[in-house]
């Protein structure tokens, strides 16, 4: 899950009337601008989008945003989601149905969740330690159930605490690619101009551009 940033074709008009010395600085300026755009603009934009798209996201999710440098030989930078975070963020980007690899998906039913919308660690173990709680399938519904008893009516029943789901349906809500594209297109032109100015200011100019003195006859 990554987006590549490449603007090499966009600067052709910019270099049309340049001297040879100036054109030589283009690859360096492009590599710098692409890297800076990925690092200082697109990556933070994705991290902010995570805060917007997901209510109280865990810090681990934001640490999954990374970037790769561009170089003079490879004028492409990229912003990506690391493999571990990608496992659960990809479906938030594309939407679809998630099927668990091994165990069923835990769906709290009337249970307290933490600030991140997840069951607190140890909740399942704590519930199953209670004498009136068991894990099983009732009327085709798998999950963790609690045996109940109404003292007034003397009726016994079952309360579903956690449901085991064999799939979960997601709608697209991340906006990773749209956010990355918008940020890159907004910030790259300024980053390139700044990088090009730095390249010209620090580069050594060849002697022939300033003229030369030929020996007399």
Image: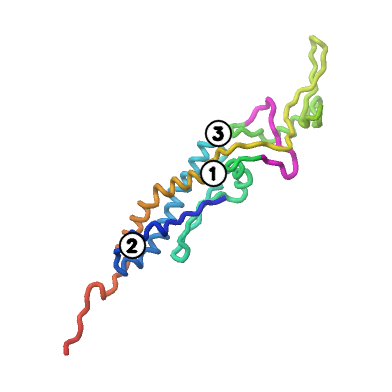
Counting from the top left corner in percent of width and height, residue 14 is at: 33, 59
Could you tell me which secondary element the residue under label 2 belongs to?
Answer: helix
Identify whether 196 is placed above or below 135: below
- Does the CB distance between marks 3 and 2 fall below 8 Å? no
Residue under label 1: 62
Q: What element carries label 1?
A: helix
Left or right relative to 52: residue 164: right
Query: Is residue 14 inside the magenta stretch?
Result: no
Magenta stretch, residue numbers: 97-113
Position in image of residue 109 (x %, y %)? 69, 27
Left or right of 103, for residue 67: left
| Residue 91: x %, y % from top left | 61, 42
Question: Which disc number belongs to residue 29?
Answer: none
Would you name the residue on which mark 3 appears? 55
The furthest residue to the top:
152
**Residue shown at 70%/35% (left/top)?**
106
The residue indicated by pointer 2 is: 15
Viewer-nearest residue: 206 or 154:
206
């Amino acid at each position: 899950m990554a987006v590549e940033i490449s603007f090499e074709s966009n600067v052709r008009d910019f270099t049309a009337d340049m001297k040879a010395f100036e054109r030589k600085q283009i690859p360096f300026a492009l590599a710098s601008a692409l890297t800076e755009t990925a690092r200082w603009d697109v990556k933070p934009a994705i991290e902010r989008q995570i805060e917007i798209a997901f209510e109280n996201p865990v810090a681990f999710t934001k640490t999954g945003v990374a970037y790769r440098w561009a170089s003079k030989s490879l004028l492409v930078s990229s912003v990506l989601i690391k493999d571990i975070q990608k496992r659960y963020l990809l479906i938030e980007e594309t939407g679809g149905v998630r099927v668990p690899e091994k165990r069923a998906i835990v769906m709290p039913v009337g249970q307290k969740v933490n600030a991140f919308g997840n069951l607190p660690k140890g909740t399942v173990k704590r519930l199953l330690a209670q004498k009136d709680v068991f894990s099983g399938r009732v009327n085709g519904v798998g999950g963790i159930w609690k045996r109940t008893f109404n003292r007034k009516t003397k009726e016994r029943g079952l309360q579903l605490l956690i449901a085991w789901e064999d799939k979960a349906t997601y709608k697209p809500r991340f906006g990773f690619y749209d956010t990355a594209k918008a940020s890159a297109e907004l910030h790259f032109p300024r980053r390139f101009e700044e990088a090009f100015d730095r390249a010209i200011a620090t580069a050594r100019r060849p002697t022939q551009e300033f003229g030369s003195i030929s020996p007399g006859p």
